[in-house]
Amino acid sequence: MAPAPSSRWCPTPEQLMILEEMYRGGVKTPSATQIQHITAHLSLYGKIEGKNVFYWFQNHKARDRQKLRRRLSKQLMIQHHHQQLYPINHHQHFLHHFLEPPCYIPGFHQVHHCNSAGFLSQAQLQNACCPQMVDYTWKVEIPGMKETEKSATGSYGDDRVFMTDMGSSLTCCSGRPLKTLELFPVTATGLDHKKTALLSSKSPNVSSPATN
Amino acid sequence: MAPAPSSRWCPTPEQLMILEEMYRGGVKTPSATQIQHITAHLSLYGKIEGKNVFYWFQNHKARDRQKLRRRLSKQLMIQHHHQQLYPINHHQHFLHHFLEPPCYIPGFHQVHHCNSAGFLSQAQLQNACCPQMVDYTWKVEIPGMKETEKSATGSYGDDRVFMTDMGSSLTCCSGRPLKTLELFPVTATGLDHKKTALLSSKSPNVSSPATN
DNA sequence: GCAAATTAATGATTTATTCAAG
DNA sequence: CTTGAATAAATCATTAATTTGC
């Protein structure tokens, strides 16, 4: 019997360290090729898949932005408070776009982005640095064409290939030359993740149509 | 010489008709398996890939929601106007979540979601009906492990598999039994799309940090 | 009529948000 | 509470309609 294989990837300290190092080094949105190499490299330290790497960077970048927004928001609050005490004409209105949505309540999924002041967040920090060239590809791959059940055979379905190619200028924000990993032979890895979100907290408004 | 191969999928009338029929029939977020079948079926009427089908449903659903929001927004405006004339106590505050962001200007990409009234959109219409079970899978697949160039060989990189499985209750909003397609043998199809968006309208705020 | 110029649709990509495991 | 995973919203970019001046 399988020892309760964790339903999601759990990065080892080494893996995490390497990922963070790369992130600090300037890799924010690795290309598919880069992801391959990173995955191959990190798999030396524990089980890992391409999607884990992809998601990790995705999330890390997003949460960086979020933290930045939050910080700026706080900062602004202070300054605002300061300004209320010492009213000078407003000079940082552009910063409003960085603000945290004031009345967003995490966990209360029907109300968000609703503030009462009149200005809000959703900044466009994207492409602030490291403009990248992207390249997407899809392919369909059927192993045996006999899947009536969805029983974890692991390699049927529509495959989506992310290929975010960075240009040749990899020395963006940080001046670091951004050392690239060497090529690694990668063998296929497949896994399924199941979600049984039929009766869980999703769709909280089944019975009462007037909930939202 | 190639007849200027369109950089993006252009659905034939038949394909469009079938897709719309399925959508009306209740298919909003087809599973990977369904996408395979749909793709195979539609490829009888013209060139098509799985990603096209996936994107089509994604976009169609999103723009449906959008249209609904817009309609409700208009409606609300009228009612609001009405209420200003005949002030009754507020009963549809929940409808605020459906409102269109009042000061969103299409084409003016730096300002959005910014209204001056105090309430806004971004409704969670998902799972309002047809609660679905999802199932994601990734896999990495390297054909020959010799890709230093990204020259359109079409099947390397990280593959992401979307497998949105509908439960057994397919008779959701519309009472229609939602006839499913038969099984088709599907062979792999791959294609590359290139984007050269390095100097185009992206990153409009490189020089002036105070733009947003 | 017709082709350059605008605008509207919509295919494709990226980012923000939410869910939920640990 | 952190964070991996999943989904939807926003955005970008290209194609089709449509308009306009000739």
Image: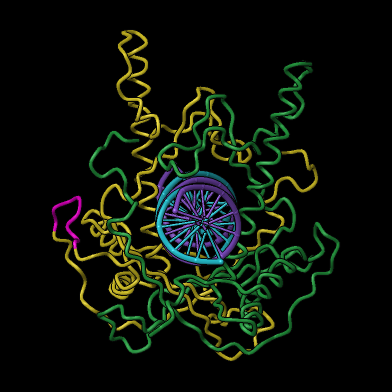
Chain colours: A yellow, B green, C cyan, D purple
Residue drawn at (19%, 61%) of the image:
A170
Above or below for A132 versus B165: above
**In this rendering, position of residue B160 left or right of residue A80:** right
Image quarter of residue B211: top left
A170 to the left or right of A105: left
User: Residue B119's spot in the image, x, y percent?
Assistant: 59, 29
Residue A173 within the magenta-colored segment of the rendering: yes
Reply above or below: B111 against B21: above
- Quadrant of the rendered structure where residue B4 is? bottom left
The vertical placement of B204 against B161, above or below, is: above
Q: Quadrant of residue B196?
A: bottom left
Number of numbered discs on residues: 0
Residue toward you, A44 or B137:
B137
Residue at 75% of width from left, 68% of height from top? Answer: B21
Question: Viewer-proximal residue, B204 or A151?
Answer: B204
Tell whether position A172 is magenta: yes
* Residue visible at 56% across and 25% down in the picture: B118
Which residue is drawn at the image coordinates 63% and 67% (left, top)? Answer: B164
Position in image of residue B149 (x %, y %): 26, 79
The quadrant the N terminus of chain B occupies is bottom left
Q: Position of residue A106 (x, y in %)?
A: 54, 38
Instruction: Tell whether B63 sits left or right of A39.
Output: right
Pick the quarter of the image with the C terminus of chain B: top left
Q: Is residue B114 above or below residue C16?
A: above
Looking at the image, which residue sits at the far right?
A: B175
Work out whether residue B105 or residue A35 is closer to the camera in this orientation and state it.
B105
- Region of the chain picked out in magenta, as a range: A169-176
Identify the main secondary structure in magenta. Answer: loop
Q: Position of residue A99 (x, y in %)?
A: 41, 32
